[in-house]
Image (cartoon, grey):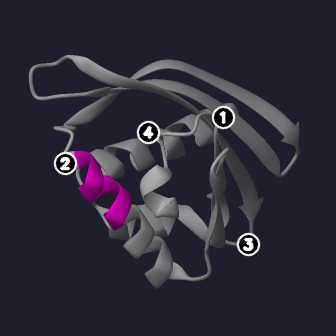
């Protein structure tokens, strides 16, 4: 799997997440889509559920003052010709430019008939996607 293609796709995804562009997120992800964390797993069966799930998560971050993410580490691994992972260590930033939360996640990418898409996220801590599991 091509690292540059995955990095470009991820950067488009994070820009869409920050700007609440849920239609773009849905275009970048394949359904069914999973988000798994130590507290549980959510599966979004179709585009509508995916948009709703990301909307709930992103809107819940507004209450914390989220304005963007600082990406500390991006580590790509090609698992196979059609599959790759991206480890992401990030900080959530408030309007003052201060980090108020640090998280880590592993994104799974797969190349199919529609091109390369994000097929799931494994969150490596208990707090990052808790809003998806309420």
| Residues in magenta, as a range | 55-61
In the rendered structure, find residue 86 and report the number of the disc placed on it.
Answer: 1
Residue at 51 percent across and 42 percent down: it is: 10
User: Is residue 81 shown above or below 44?
Assistant: above
User: Is residue 86 shown above or below 58?
Assistant: above
Q: Which residue, given by chain and number where applicable, does mark 2 sit on?
A: 62
Q: Which residue, given by chain and number where applicable, does mark 3 sit on?
A: 113
Which one is nearer the viewer's eye here, 63 or 93? 63
For label 4, the crowd category at 10 Å Cα-Cα, with few meaning under 14, some 14 to 19 and many 20 or more, is: few
Q: Which circle's residue, 4 or 3, is located before the other in the chain? A: 4
Label 4, label 3: how far apart the Cα atoms are: 22 Å
Label 1, label 2: how far apart the Cα atoms are: 25 Å
Residue at 25 percent across and 58 percent down: it is: 59
Q: Which circle's residue, 3 or 2, is located before the other in the chain? A: 2
Label 3, label 1: how far apart the Cα atoms are: 21 Å
Q: Secondary structure at mark 1?
A: strand
> Does 110 lie within the magenta span?
no
Q: Nearer the viewer, mark 1 or mark 4?
A: 1
Q: Secondary structure at mark 3?
A: loop
């Amino acid at each position: 799997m091509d690292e540059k293609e995955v990095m470009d796709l991820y950067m488009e995804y994070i820009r869409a997440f920050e700007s609440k562009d849920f239609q773009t997120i849905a275009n970048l992800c394949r359904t069914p889509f999973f988000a798994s964390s130590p507290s549980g797993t959510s599966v979004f069966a179709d585009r509508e559920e995916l948009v709703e799930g990301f909307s709930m998560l992103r809107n819940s971050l507004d209450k914390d003052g989220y304005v963007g993410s600082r990406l500390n580490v991006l580590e790509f691994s090609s698992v196979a010709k059609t599959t790759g992972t991206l480890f992401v260590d990030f900080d959530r930033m408030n309007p003052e430019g201060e980090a108020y939360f640090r998280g880590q996640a592993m994104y799974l990418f797969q190349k199919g008939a529609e091109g390369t898409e994000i097929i799931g996220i494994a969150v490596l801590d208990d707090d990052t996607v808790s809003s998806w599991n309420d």
